[in-house]
Image: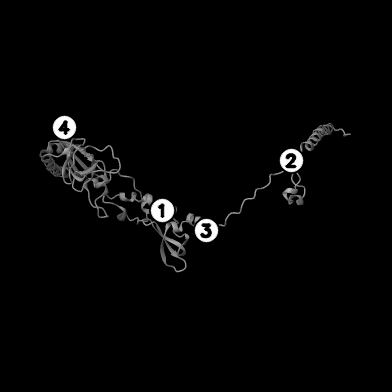
């Protein structure tokens, strides 16, 4: 069984193994973390899944009244720490922007820890800032600089599609995104159109890119002359989600959407070969090659039964004298060649 929880309202989802507990949607549960169990809200009740999922953290149980009171106090401490951190940064005149605050009070090695996440255009010397924050908050301070995408993940927001940001809800790892992906999908290269809330290229460009690559590799390119069930035409566009090709017909000039399989050359070749190719003629076995070629063209066109028999086909008593005659002639040829080498005239 699998359940999903969230530490913030409309925040990122974390999946757990409910174990023996069966919380309902809206219940507060304890989630094991590196800094001890923390309170989270159940947004997906435990249910069975078809696939076997392993390696999920085990739910620590239902949150008690003491856990809920501690969680509320920590929320107030985080809000106060954010105000103090912003005021102190302003006093030091540092180019830093506070993105998030985390308060830890259940670690064995420390009493209280305040983690400040910030973004900055370059490296910042915040040694004096750490001393002032530790004196004001009376806790151990850690400053962690994050990038533009991590900033959007921590703050959350609404994307151009009108839904919550992918990085703030379900996206775990940031995959590399390039402008080439936008070109393959025929998207406008306007930065305002293909950039997300973080100012970088939208992560959703990666989702459908393999589908566009497969379609472009098999479909005819724009400007290619094709044959469609409605007539001959030229490809003027692609519609990847519907797996169709937009064709302008040569006869009427109108445009029509045809399936990619209807204009694909391999299918047309297969249909042409299966419908127009006549039956193959029966194969006639040929006679084996003889040892000697026919002397004349007339002998070459004679029927097989009138062809002269080969030497291998002669009877044994007829083939033996021929072999004996060849053996008696070979020494004469060798002796004649030897006289020629010595310059003598053969007798």
Q: Residue at x 42, y 57 (%)?
A: 260
Compare residues 347 and 134 and report the one nearer the observer: 347
Q: Is tag 4's residue or tag 2's residue first in the polypeptide sequence?
A: 4
Separation of marks 3 and 1 at Cα, in angstroms:
28 Å
Tell me if mark 4 has few (under 14), some (14-19) or many (20+) residues whose alpha carbon lies within 10 angstroms of its own. few
Q: Quadrant of the C terminus?
A: top right
Kind of element beneath mark 2: helix
Q: Quadrant of the N terminus?
A: top left
Residue 169 appears in the rendering: yes
Q: Is tag 2's residue or tag 1's residue first in the polypeptide sequence?
A: 1
Separation of marks 2 and 1 at Cα, in angstroms:
65 Å
- Return the mark for residue 313: 2
Q: Is tag 3's residue or tag 2's residue first in the polypeptide sequence?
A: 3
Question: In front of the other: label 2 or label 1?
Answer: 2
- Return the mark for residue 241: none
Q: Position of residue 16 (x, y in %)?
A: 23, 40
Residue 201 appears in the rendering: no
Q: Residue at x 21, y 42 (%)?
A: 117
Compare residues 242 and 2 and report the one nearer the observer: 2
Q: How many marks?
A: 4
Where 281 sits versus 55, above or below?
below
- Return the mark for residue 215: 1
- Return the mark for residue 275: 3
Kind of element beneath mark 1: helix
- Return the mark for residue 110: 4
Q: Are marks 4 and 3 in contact (CB under 8 Å)?
A: no
Query: Along the horizontal axis of the image, is 56 left or right of 209?
Result: left
Q: Residue pushed farthest bottom?
A: 252
């Amino acid at each position: 069984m699998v359940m999903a929880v969230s530490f913030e309202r409309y925040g990122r989802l974390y999946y757990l193994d409910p174990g023996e507990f069966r919380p309902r949607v809206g219940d507060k549960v304890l989630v094991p973390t590196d800094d001890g169990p923390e309170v989270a809200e159940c947004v997906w009740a435990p249910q069975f899944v078809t696939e076997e999922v392993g390696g999920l953290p085990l739910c620590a149980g239902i949150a008690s009244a003491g856990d809920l009171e501690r969680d509320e106090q920590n929320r107030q401490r985080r809000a106060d720490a954010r105000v103090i951190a912003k005021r102190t940064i302003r006093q030091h005149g540092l180019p830093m922007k506070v993105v998030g605050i985390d308060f830890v009070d259940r670690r064995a090695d420390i009493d209280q820890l305040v983690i400040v996440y910030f973004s900055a255009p370059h490296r910042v010397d915040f040694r004096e800032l750490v001393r002032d924050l530790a004196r004001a908050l009376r806790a151990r301070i850690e400053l962690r600089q994050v990038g533009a995408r991590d900033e959007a993940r921590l703050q959350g927001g609404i994307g151009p599609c009108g839904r919550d940001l992918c990085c703030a809800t379900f996206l775990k790892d940031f995959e590399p995104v390039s402008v080439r992906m936008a070109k393959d999908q025929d998207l406008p290269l306007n930065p305002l159109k293909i950039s997300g809330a973080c100012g970088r290229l939208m992560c959703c460009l990666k989702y459908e890119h393999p589908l566009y690559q497969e379609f472009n590799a098999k479909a005819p390119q724009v400007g290619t002359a094709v044959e469609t069930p409605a007539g001959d035409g030229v490809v003027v566009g692609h519609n990847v989600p519907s797996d169709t090709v937009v064709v302008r017909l040569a006869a009427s000039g109108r445009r029509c959407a045809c399936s990619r399989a209807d204009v694909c050359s391999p299918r047309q070749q297969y249909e042409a070969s299966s419908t127009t190719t006549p039956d193959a003629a029966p194969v006639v076995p040929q006679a084996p090659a003889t040892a000697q070629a026919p002397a004349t063209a007339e002998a070459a066109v004679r029927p097989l039964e009138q062809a002269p028999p080969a030497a291998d086909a002669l009877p044994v008593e007829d083939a033996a004298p021929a072999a004996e005659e060849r053996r008696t002639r070979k020494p004469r040829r060798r002796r004649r060649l030897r006289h020629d080498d010595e310059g003598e005239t053969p007798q």
